[in-house]
Image (cartoon, coloured by chain):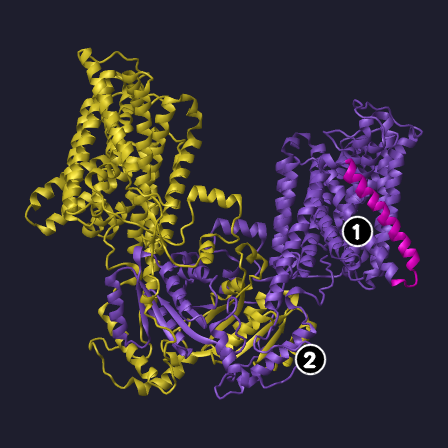
Chain colours: A purple, B yellow
């Protein structure tokens, strides 16, 4: 599916520059113009043709089977082997296992997006919502039954309220689809219309929603299986964790979601539900629609507002996932919004029919939720015994729930990328086409879902209270955003749309508040704490990015920009430059990394050498060829070795200045760093280029045999300002 | 203690060059002379004074408490904080726990070596050997008792043979100390005199010895504790793993071994043993030296050669660690070898007295080894009841065994560094003064010891069969090496020394063969397989290093070296150079990384930019200031962004050539790599310098918020030849 919000001109890493920044850019460019025109040849002719059109196209789509990922041709066969491997590449069995689980490593992959027909979009996008009827009615009854027959008497009215809610929210999302043809997820709609914080809150609701979709769907799917095979019940937690690992592996591998394979479970589930309802009603008709007598468990609560509220908010989880289509409008074939709306209508229709049918059936059969068996399983057993019909119902239920969990794996990275776009999440999640962004999001989701699943022992009933809060928080904010949207826009049908959205929003708010209050102690507090934590973390991330952006803004240190004149007085910056530049070099503010012109940079290349071999000679030649001052640095462990190295240097011809440091205690990296730091202190204006030879082995598994000095040094020097690190490879 | 083999002129990384290499070096130097004299200013004046004498001394010894590590001053406070932290520095509680376990992070540490007086050296170096009497006699009796009273009758003769062995091996090591005043570990002696493979086999024996010293000593120490507190017995494995973790943490932290703290347990143990023997003999004297009657377990074997052999080789483990002093000669105060010899004599004397005393005591008391209680504990209980005397014996035993395990933590890295020196182990273990070498060795040892300990359930009896094989293999080869040594040397006392070493070697060989045969199935095979694996791995490592050395040898590509004339015909290589060089550039052999002269290198700098911010401008300025052709590269995700970037570039003044690649599927690294590879293919003679801006955050924990493109690109480009990677830091 891979529907995304608009890539947006605001993508953080390549943001458009503001007017002031453009002005600065032009000014800086003028300075460069002066420099580049100078007698020194700053700008040399290119020895290659940068127009790469004549070379194989930059990226080639390679067949990647049924995967969601596409290979982007980047490297030769050798590099390809290396790129995906980890340090010290695994061999033999490990590789084979990895292949089976994660597939042939894709050299460098990107995500394929494609358009769906309605008949494909319906099952793929509805799996989450429709599968919710597997646990929603049961969750409602599990509350009502606490008050015995008196409680169960409310099942039909409460279910009626939920159906009304489905209807209202469905109508509401029809408006969203029209208004946001590029995909109107709760985060986008809420941020667009209500502002940053409501947007973030909606995103927090969504993120907890996706995590819980995975946990609840898998818990419910496992329950469908253990209902049929009670002997598996003790293994609920391992089975669930196994299912999460399966989803993790499949998604890391890059399973494409739009295939017919993914349509089958939903259609099978719908068919199973209709068969179940049909058989059940026929059976009930035979009895004259009289409820069967049933043995109820002991009554522990009395019917009261709180109980009804809890039942209502638990049952409302039957509509989780209803928003999926409005997120995915761009994934439809044109006219996108129209097709999406039609599909939404079908879906809500199916949802209402299935939900109503099951609740009525439960009412007629007087099935009581039990710990051992799901109500769906009980209903199926009543209708089909233990034959193939029963097996089909349970298998279809488990399959559609696994599929529903899988949809969260598509949506979670999408929301993360939107958050990253706005600076609320690490930038690594930004590029949705990038395998890395997906992999990290997938890992994060799996980890969180597994944690929640294990913490609540894989029990659907225990997870439901957490679920409702996040979902309806996102719904509420999304609908509220739509209300503001219509109020601002006031186009042709705005009154009607506003009314629908207001109704949907109000009802969602009622569910949210109901769930938050009535289930606070039984789990909702976890979701509320998670939302709060999410707000804190995202806000801090945003603050960091804002500080970084401020620090990275183009800023001409030389020229004071007059506030008003866009061009400023072109008062011959040429003449002012030299002394200013000179003065700045000494009193460089901050980290002193403020050179913006080639002529401002004063070079010193420092070549760190362990020995005089071919790699060292090549590194020296590289350093000398830069035609900047070069200082060679050698750390000797003993005085004797120092003398010997000096002799070799002389024999070579002493072509470059050499400094030998005899290291006390035989440390290597520390004296090197100390030396380089000393050079920096002596002349802070210098840009020190530390040049290191680096042996690259042909087999990755051999790399550990060679000195890691380069990477250790890189880490040690990283915090020091104005130290450029250059590694010259030598391939064995 | 930290005695080391001679640092040796052969240290792999800074090997002395051979005559042929020196000749090549002089020739290459002559070529450089021609180049550097050319009109271009290849060699520029240094802007700094490379003589750093005026700056704070390169390394400062900072007080590190009682630690073995010394801080080598390298960086400012900020860098110091960062260097020891890992990526995404831990915060809060994690830091505090780490501090407690591993101590304040040392900025960059090296190992302190110091000299010891004999009275300090004795306990420190003898802990391993003397503590062996805690399990040796018991191991012997545990075999003999299988044949009942008939078997136990052999305890005194077998013990006599072991005492003779101790005497002979002690005398033998006295010769080694004289011959190898710089430290004569088995590996050194065997390689020096018998050749590479025997040396490696000895090293293999030593390595397994050290691993088993840790496992056996801890198993025996835990047994001493559980004998006193039987309720702890079920926790043997967790207790042992805990002890290994303790040793790991202590050694990572850098515990100094020479302190009086480390002398105490040995002296306490010796005192405890003498008290035990004294009381026991006094008690027996009261009974007229009549053995007590004892209840023996059921007889399962008959007395036979194999049983006696097993008993002998098991009992011989009482002398493990006897070689420690000969390894550590340089750690003594001058005259080193004389002091070491005296200490060795004391140690062997103590060992023989204690071993004999305990065996006799066991014989008199007719104590039978049992699974619940060690024989030492039984003896102590007989003499002291359960009072303070008993507690002292058990505590001293446990303490000295922990200390014995700790000595392996000093020896293991030492042997690894010797192996690394000769190219048999990864070079990272080479620099013994370096904290890194120690840390890696310590981790390796802990892991191996923990594995063995857990695999054998922490039972001393189960570990003993593995132990004897490795130790006596190393002993045998060491003594055999000494025989060859004396035969070759034939100095004043050679006949006597050769005789002692031959006797010691022969007896060790007998024990090795005995142990290997009689205990093959009960565990010795593990040690034999480990030795074989060790040989395979070290040989392959050596082969890699030899190939690498060959590839890295100085090799003048321009000048064919005549085989005989050392100077060669100085037939004006100057005149031949240009066209040869030109021809080579196109048809570069191999990876083409054969430029050795500055003028041979043709540069192209490629600046990869994501956006036009301050970091980018600084990177561009850096690239331009190198005065080589520069090509800027930008990956755009959309056509629109590409146009925008082009506009900015034009606004800036189009000072450098720019190539924009629109990335399909929004991948970033792959198209960059593809582009760079394309440039390389177009002109393989070019050295491409890929210059990347790199944002460095002031807090390490924020680094993950910034693009990892630089490191991903570095990894992806690494296999490609002639691509130099330069990162220009920008500190936030």
Which structural element holds mark 1? helix
Query: Height in image: B433 above or below B679?
Result: above
The quarter holding residue B669 reads bottom right
- Which residue does the image show at 42% across and 25% down from the upper left? B233
Q: Which mark is residue A566?
A: 2
Q: Residues within 10 Å of mark 1 (few under 14, many from 20)?
A: many
Residue B76 percent location from the top left of the image: 43, 59
- Which residue does the image show at 68% across and 65% down from the upper left? A11
Q: Could you say which is closer to the camera, residue B716 or residue B609? A: B609
A399 to the left or right of A118: left
Which structural element holds mark 2? loop
> In this view of the protein, can residue A395 be seen by the observer?
no
Q: Magenta stretch containing residue B572, yes or no?
A: no
Specify the principal SS of the magenta part: helix
Q: Which mark is residue A477?
A: 1
> In this view of the protein, can residue B91 be seen by the observer?
yes
Foreground mark, 2 or 1, reads 2
Q: Chain of mark 2?
A: A
From this viewpoint, which residue is outermost toward the left? B492
- Label tally: 2
Asked if badges 2 and 1 are on one and the same chain, I answer: yes
Query: Height in image: B151 above or below B207?
Result: above
From this viewpoint, which residue is outermost toward the right? A288
Q: Could you say which is closer to the camera, residue B166 or residue B643? A: B643
Residue B702 percent location from the top left of the image: 56, 56
Query: Height in image: A599 above or below B490?
Result: below
Residue A260 percent location from the top left of the image: 74, 53
Query: Could you tell me which quadrant the N terminus of chain A lies in?
Result: bottom right
Residue A477 percent location from the top left of the image: 79, 51
Query: Height in image: A422 above or below A629?
Result: above
Magenta part of the chain: A489-518
């Amino acid at each position: 599916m891979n529907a995304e919000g608009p890539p947006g001109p605001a993508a953080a890493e390549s943001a458009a520059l503001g007017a002031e920044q453009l002005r600065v850019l032009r000014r800086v460019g003028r300075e460069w113009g002066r420099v580049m025109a100078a007698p020194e040849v700053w700008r040399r002719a290119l020895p290659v043709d940068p127009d790469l059109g004549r070379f194989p196209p930059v990226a080639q789509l390679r067949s990647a089977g049924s995967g969601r990922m596409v290979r982007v041709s980047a490297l030769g066969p050798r590099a390809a082997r290396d790129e995906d491997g980890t340090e010290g590449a695994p061999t033999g069995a490990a590789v084979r296992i990895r292949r089976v689980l994660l597939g042939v490593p894709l050299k460098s992959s990107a995500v394929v997006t494609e358009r769906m027909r309605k008949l494909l979009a319906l099952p793929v996008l509805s799996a989450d919502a429709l599968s919710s009827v597997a646990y929603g009615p049961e969750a409602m009854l599990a509350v009502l039954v606490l008050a015995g027959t008196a409680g169960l008497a409310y099942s039909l009215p409460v279910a009626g309220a939920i159906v009304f809610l489905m209807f209202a929210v469905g109508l509401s999302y029809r408006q969203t689809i029209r208004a946001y043809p590029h995909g109107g997820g709760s985060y986008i709609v809420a941020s667009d219309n209500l502002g940053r914080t409501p947007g973030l809150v909606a995103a927090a609701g969504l993120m907890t929603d996706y995590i819980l979709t995975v946990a609840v769907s898998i818990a419910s799917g496992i329950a469908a299986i253990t209902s049929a095979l009670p002997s598996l019940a003790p293994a609920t937690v391992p089975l669930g964790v196994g299912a999460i690992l399966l989803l993790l592996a499949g998604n890391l591998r890059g399973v494409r979601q739009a295939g017919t394979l993914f349509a089958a479970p939903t259609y099978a589930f719908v068919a199973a539900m209709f068969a179940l309802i049909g058989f059940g009603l026929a059976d009930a008709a035979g009895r004259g629609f009289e409820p069967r007598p049933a043995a109820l468990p002991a009554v522990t609560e009395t019917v009261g507002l709180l109980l009804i509220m809890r039942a209502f908010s638990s049952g409302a989880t039957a509509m989780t996932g209803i928003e999926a289509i409005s997120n995915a409008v761009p994934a439809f074939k044109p006219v996108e919004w129209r097709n999406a709306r039609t599909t939404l209508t079908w879906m809500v229709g199916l949802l209402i029919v299935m939900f109503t049918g099951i609740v009525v059936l439960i009412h007629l059969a007087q099935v009581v939720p039990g710990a051992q068996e799901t109500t769906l399983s009980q209903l199926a057993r009543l209708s089909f015994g233990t034959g193939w019909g029963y097996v089909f119902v349970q298998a279809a239920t488990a399959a559609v729930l696994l599929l529903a969990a899988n949809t969260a794996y598509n949506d979670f990275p999408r929301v993360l990328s939107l958050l990253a776009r706005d600076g609320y999440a690490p930038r690594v999640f930004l590029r949705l086409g990038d395998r890395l962004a997906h992999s990290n999001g997938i890992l994060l989701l799996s980890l969180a879902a597994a944690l929640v699943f294990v913490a609540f022992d894989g029990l659907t009933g225990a997870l439901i209270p957490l679920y409702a809060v996040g979902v309806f928080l996102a719904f509420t904010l999304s609908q509220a955003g739509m209300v503001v949207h219509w109020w601002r826009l006031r186009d042709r049908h705005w009154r009607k749309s506003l009314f629908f959205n207001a109704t949907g929003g109000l009802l969602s708010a009622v569910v949210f508040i109901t769930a938050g209050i009535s289930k606070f102690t039984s789990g909702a507090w976890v979701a509320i704490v998670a939302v709060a934590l999410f707000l804190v973390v995202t806000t801090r991330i945003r603050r960091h990015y804002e500080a970084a952006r401020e620090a990275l803004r183009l800023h001409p240190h030389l020229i004071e920009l007059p506030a008003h004149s866009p061009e400023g007085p072109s008062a011959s910056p040429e003449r002012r430059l030299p002394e200013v530049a000179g003065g700045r070099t000494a009193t460089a503010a901050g980290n002193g990394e403020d050179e913006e012109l080639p002529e401002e940079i004063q070079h010193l290349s420092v070549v760190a050498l362990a020995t005089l071999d071919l790699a060292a000679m090549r590194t020296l030649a590289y350093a000398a060829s830069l035609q900047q001052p070069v200082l060679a640095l050698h750390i000797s462990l003993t005085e004797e070795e120092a003398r010997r190295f000096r002799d070799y240097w002389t024999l070579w011809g002493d072509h470059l200045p050499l400094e030998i440091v005899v290291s006390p205690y035989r440390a290597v990296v520390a004296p090197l760093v100390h030396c380089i730091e000393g050079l920096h202190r002596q002349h802070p204006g210098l840009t020190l280029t530390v040049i290191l030879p680096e042996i690259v082995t042909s087999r990755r598994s051999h790399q550990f045999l060679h000195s890691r000095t380069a990477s250790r040094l890189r880490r040690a020097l990283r915090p020091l300002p104005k130290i450029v690190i250059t590694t010259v490879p030598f391939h064995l």
